[in-house]
Amino acid sequence: MAIPSSLVQSLQSVKGFNQETFEAVHASGEQVTSIRVNPAKLSSIDELEFPGDISFTKIPWSTTGYYLNTRPSFTADPLLHAGAYYVQEASSMFLEEVLRQTVDLSVELKVLDLCAAPGGKSTLIHSLLNDQSLLISNELIKTRVNILTENLSKWGTANVIVTNNDAASFKRLPGYFDVVVVDAPCSGSGLFRKDENAIKEWSDQNVVLCSQRQQRILEDVMPSLKPGGILIYSTCSYSEAEDEHIAAWLVNDLHMQSLQIKVPDSWQIVETISLLNNGYGYRFFPDRLKGEGFYVAAFKKNNEVGEEERGKKHDQKRAGKLTKLSPAALKSIARYLHNSNSYFYLLQNGELLALPFFLEKELPYIQSALYLKKAGISIGTLIRDELVPGHELAMSGQLAPNIIRVEVSKENALQYLRRQEITGQIPGTGWAIITHRSLPLGWVKLLQNRVNNYYPKEWRILNK
């Protein structure tokens, strides 16, 4: 693997860079596999069912992250489709440590994950927030919003809104967010080991273009961060122009306060300090630790005159007409949704959405500013006041306890996930949940002579 010589040359003065070991680890062909367990669905890594020769090692900066000694076939694991875990690069899981050290996660928060697809950081953030907090997970590129929505739906996210907007759109929510996470589009040099195409696409010119784009994104989204709020900025680039120089620009031009993160020496994460302003940043080099190239920095927004008042004016405008359901419809919903009285309901494009009550005043305000792709739980469709349950409800972790559950083997679970016929005698009639190792996979309709498979066509496993 030939690392661009101009990149190597540009890193000579960067703290922690060792050309010999850096080039050696890229030439080795070594691949690091890591996953993060969903604490809402699994209580222990031991509940997974990987082959016996696969072992786990804890990722030190993640409470639920693990290295795997070899990469299994994740697609052939029903528990991945059940949202029991997420396959995520280990270095990026350091976001958890940054959040824990800079944010009081015990209070109600409004958090924006601005560049969210495919969903690794959003699912991580969601697992750290309490039930009364709101996560807005945004993706600009329309072709990537669907995979973001799918991954969040599998994770089980009632208090999440997925949006499809550019950064400038968030100016319409001034001073709204307590935390903004920007995992910015970058030149991708930190992913050379995982993606050889990243090497072909890398150039000095692209680094410059990415740095300019990163500044535009940050400048556009900054008005939406409340005074005293926390900005977390990250890239998968080694280039100072996309890392330390952006940190310096945030402090010097946008008057942000750089925050230092306490990192044990044993983790081998390199703390860098911008020579211009003592802006702290944290670099991950693959020759020093088990993970890919990554950079992250945290900042606190200083108070701005007038911004709090603008937020209050928007609070006064929060109102909207929400869906009113008949008693018969509410009774039908209660048969499928646990604690159905804890939600309000909204019809959108034929789908019935269930959202926690604390979002009742927030949603119209957000909807007036942004394009919403997903909000709360899509629980299904109403036909003559009867709920036809939807897949997102099956994955939500909010199923009513009386629903019929059909536990199946791994082989039958894979048959179901391929949207093929379910074999064997299954007692009862009506809607039922297919489960594997007690985790829901989706709906079937039990009829007298057959079982209809309702796994989403667009999510089905295509390989044999």
Image (cartoon, rainbow, N blue to C red):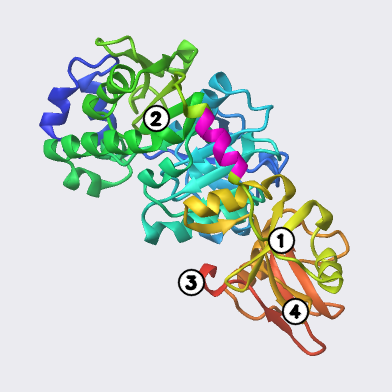
- Residue corresponding to mark 2: 233
Q: Amino acid at mark 2?
A: Tyr
Q: Amino acid at mark 1?
A: Tyr
353 with respect to 60 (left or right): right
- What is the spatial separation of the Cα atoms under label 4 and label 1, in whole angstroms? 24 Å
| Residue 80 appearing in the image | no
Q: Main secondary structure of the magenta part?
A: helix
- Residue corresponding to mark 3: 462
Q: Amino acid at mark 4?
A: Lys
Marking on residue 345 = 1
Q: Tell me which numbered mark, 4 or 2, is placed earlier along the sequence.
A: 2
Q: Is 315 part of what is drawn in magenta? A: yes
- In this picture, which residue range is highlighted in magenta? 309-316
Residue at image coords 39%, 37%: 221
Quarter of the image that includes the N terminus: top left
Which mark lies nearer to you, 4 or 2?
Answer: 2
Which mark lies nearer to you, 3 or 4?
Answer: 4
Q: Position of residue 328 (x, y in %)?
A: 86, 73
Give the answer, above or below, for where 23 lies relative to 371: above
Q: Position of residue 365 (x, y in %)?
A: 56, 49
Which mark lies nearer to you, 1 or 2?
Answer: 1
> Which residue is more in the foreground, 52 or 228?
228
